[in-house]
Image: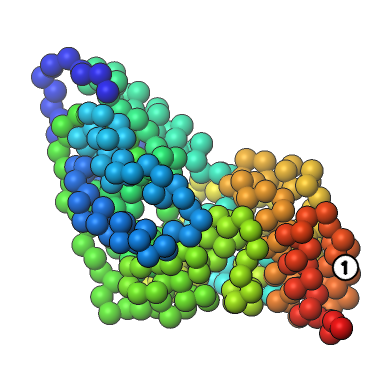
């Protein structure tokens, strides 16, 4: 980062201005913290040693830059953390869809437009305003786009605490929100970190379909349905197929049972509203999407990044878990000769749940 010229700047006033700009740009909360993540670094290293990251090699690829912001962006002394709520519908509606085994359940964050570009664009607007006032170009904006411990930084910045399920929880707004960051070399005043209010509650641990929360605040990603349906590229282990139910992209169970989410508010941002009928689509309908249609329907969506083959793999499992009927069996038989061995394996498994195979 280039050094900014010495100038009398009221950093307290600037920090308040940043928060006002953030609110005007659609962020529900803005907090500021320093870059000290020693405890987080220790916990991350222990998590990696246990292999809980699975095939997510990127979690250890960048060495210490993940937990030492100034090594990722030289000159960084503060991190501005932002929260943007995304819940698109009442939680009861999501539960109803999850309870319909022939419907496809998609994590609520992925029903609308991909948040990455949307949030990054707004953060860039805000950073440009700060640059004009502070005459500093010593910053970078991020939205889940670099090796950053964004949850730990959000906790230190007072956005919320990291719950036992590893998501960030806000006492007044629950956990249905995205995070974004600005790394800066400006000595802004630091906000008070969040206090943990999980208490004795263990709802998230008890409800996890695959027992991925192996201990409070410890998630074995290799067991997590979000990891299995999004990050894992190969075959989904058979032990997790039945517990997946109709969850074809991500899993919201741990958030749905969190008592703090009774305070969650619906988003007013239309970009996060459901698109392409994904909040009510059937498994058979989505299984019928060819690659071209898949790419068309998921344009501008976070879902597109898993690719068509993983999409079919995930839905095949959902179809295998659904009650038997003619339409489901016919849909699976059509894909039985699919060119991809990955798809064929999961189609065969699904068929075996409906037909006695010799």
Task: Judge left or right: residue 266 versus residue 352.
Answer: left
**Front one among 264 and 217:** 217
Residue at the limit of the structure toward the top, as seen here: 5
The answer to whether residue 99 is visible is no
Residue 154 image point, x, y percent: 29, 50
When the figure is inspected, residue 269 is found, relative to residue 3, above or below; the finding is: below
The image quadrant that residue 161 belongs to is: bottom left
Quadrant (top left, top right, bottom left, bottom right) of the C terminus: bottom right
Residue beneath the point at 13% across and 16% down: 6
Image-based side of 15 in relation to 281, left or right: left
Circle 1: element type: helix
Q: Position of residue 334 (x, y in %)?
A: 88, 63
- Scheme of image coloration: rainbow
Q: Which residue is mark 1?
A: 333
Judge left or right: residue 75 versus residue 254: left
At 33% from the left and 49% from the top, the residue drawn is: 149
Q: Is residue 134 visible?
A: yes
Q: Is residue 305 above or below residue 6?
A: below
Tell me residue 67's x, y (percent): 28, 46
Q: Quadrant of residue 17?
A: top left
- The foreground one among 297 and 165 is 165
């Amino acid at each position: 980062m280039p050094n900014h010229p010495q100038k009398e700047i009221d950093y307290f006033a600037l920090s308040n201005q940043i928060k006002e700009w953030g609110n005007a740009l659609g962020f529900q909360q803005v907090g500021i913290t320093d870059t000290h993540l020693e405890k987080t670094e220790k916990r991350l290293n222990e998590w990696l040693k246990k292999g809980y990251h699975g095939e997510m090699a990127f979690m250890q690829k960048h060495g210490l830059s993940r937990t030492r912001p100034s090594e990722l962006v030289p000159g960084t002394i503060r991190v501005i953390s932002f929260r943007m709520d995304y819940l698109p519908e009442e939680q009861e509606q999501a539960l109803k869809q999850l309870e319909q085994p022939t419907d496809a359940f998609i994590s609520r964050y992925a029903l609308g437009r991909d948040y990455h570009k949307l949030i990054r664009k707004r953060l860039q607007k805000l950073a440009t305003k700060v640059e004009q006032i502070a005459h500093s170009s010593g910053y970078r904006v991020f939205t889940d786009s670099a090796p950053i411990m964004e949850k730990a930084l959000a906790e230190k910045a007072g956005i919320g605490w990291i719950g036992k399920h590893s998501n960030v929880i806000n006492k007044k707004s629950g956990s249905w929100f995205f995070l974004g960051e600005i790394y800066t070399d400006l000595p802004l005043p630091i906000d008070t970190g969040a206090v943990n209010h999980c208490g004795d509650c263990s709802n998230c641990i008890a409800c996890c379909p695959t027992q991925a929360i192996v201990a409070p605040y410890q998630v074995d990603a290799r067991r997590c349905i979000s990891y299995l349906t999004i990050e894992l590229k190969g075959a989904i282990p058979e032990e997790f197929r039945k517990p997946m139910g109709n969850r074809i992209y991500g899993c919201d169970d741990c958030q749905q049972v969190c008592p703090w989410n009774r305070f969650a508010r619906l988003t007013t941002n239309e970009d996060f509203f459901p698109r392409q009928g994904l909040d009510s689509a059937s498994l058979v309908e989505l299984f019928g999407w060819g690659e071209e249609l898949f790419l068309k329907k998921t344009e501008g969506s976070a879902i597109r990044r898993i690719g068509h083959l993983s999409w079919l793999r995930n839905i095949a499992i959902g179809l295998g878990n659904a009650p038997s009927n003619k339409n489901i069996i016919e849909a699976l038989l059509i894909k039985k000769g699919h060119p991809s061995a990955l798809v064929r394996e999961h189609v065969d498994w699904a068929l075996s749940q409906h037909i006695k195979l010799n």
